[in-house]
């Protein structure tokens, strides 16, 4: 007998339900919008609001809470703290909207598109690969100038 389970069951145990919520929220964070059933969207909207409110605190402890929720996935935590939260600073709550879609063919379940209330412009995270590429680009720019200077020095030395 399952007692004291708050929210919706979705015919799952606690761990599977938490994993479902985590995967839906991470898909929304990474893609900007998801298509899911109305019941699932209604279940994760309060969770999203809580996570965004936590991220708005902009502290080390808030990042750690987000990191623990998303099983230490740095990419998702970066997206929430660096791109999504600044865009949603003005909103006190209700950061997502559910747009109704036609029912699903297989079981006629009510479907919705869950998306952010404001348009989010993505920032690219700085990785080791991008750092190396920028260093190479800087070196390539400097090489022709250095080569010109050497030629000029050689010509001056010969005169």
Image (cartoon, rainbow, N blue to C red):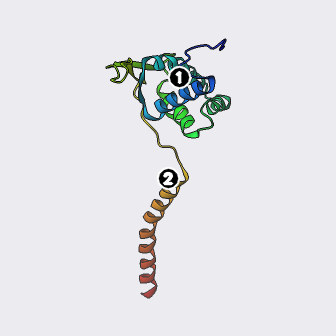
User: Under tag 1, what secondary structure?
Assistant: helix
Q: Is residue 11 left or right of residue 36?
A: right
**Residue 95 in sight:** no
What x and y, as percent, mark residue 134?
A: 48, 56
Q: Quadrant of residue 3?
A: top right
Residue occupying the point 47% across, 43% down: 124
Label placed on residue 48: 1
Q: Quadrant of residue 4?
A: top right
What x and y, as percent, mark residue 71?
A: 62, 35
As drawn, the residue found furthest toward the bottom would be 158
Q: Which residue is mark 2?
A: 130
Density class for disc 2 (Cα within 10 Å; few <14, some 14-19, many ≥20) is: few
Label placed on residue 23: none
Q: Is residue 63 left or right of residue 94?
A: right
Q: Nearer the viewer, mark 2 or mark 1?
A: 1
What x and y, as percent, mark residue 83?
A: 49, 33
Residue occupying the point 43% across, 34% down: 31
**Depth check: 14 or 85 in front?**
14
Mark positioned earlier in the residue sequence (2 or 1): 1
User: Are the residues flagged by discs 2 and 1 in contact, CB closer than 8 Å?
Assistant: no
Query: What's the CA distance linking mark 2 and mark 1?
Result: 30 Å
Q: Identify the image quadrant of the C terminus.
A: bottom left
Residue occupying the point 42% across, 19% down: 97
User: Under tag 2, what secondary structure?
Assistant: helix
Above or below, 100 against 120 in this view is: above
Density class for disc 1 (Cα within 10 Å; few <14, some 14-19, many ≥20) is: many
What x and y, as percent, mark residue 99?
A: 36, 19
């Amino acid at each position: 007998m399952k007692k004291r389970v708050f929210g919706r069951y979705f015919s799952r145990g606690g761990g599977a339900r938490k994993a479902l919520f985590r995967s839906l929220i991470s898909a929304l964070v990474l893609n900007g919008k998801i298509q899911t059933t109305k019941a699932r969207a209604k279940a994760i909207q309060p969770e999203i609001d809580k996570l965004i409110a936590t991220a708005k605190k902009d502290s080390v402890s808030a990042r750690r809470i987000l990191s623990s929720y998303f099983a230490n996935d740095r990419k998702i935590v970066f997206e929430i703290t660096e791109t999504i939260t600044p865009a949603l600073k003005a909103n006190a709550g209700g950061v997502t909207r559910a747009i109704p879609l036609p029912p699903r063919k297989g079981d006629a379940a009510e479907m919705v598109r869950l998306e952010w209330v404001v348009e989010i412009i993505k920032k690219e995270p700085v990785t080791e690969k991008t750092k190396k590429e920028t260093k190479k680009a800087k070196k390539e720019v400097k090489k022709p100038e250095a080569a010109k200077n050497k030629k000029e020095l050689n010509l001056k030395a010969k005169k």
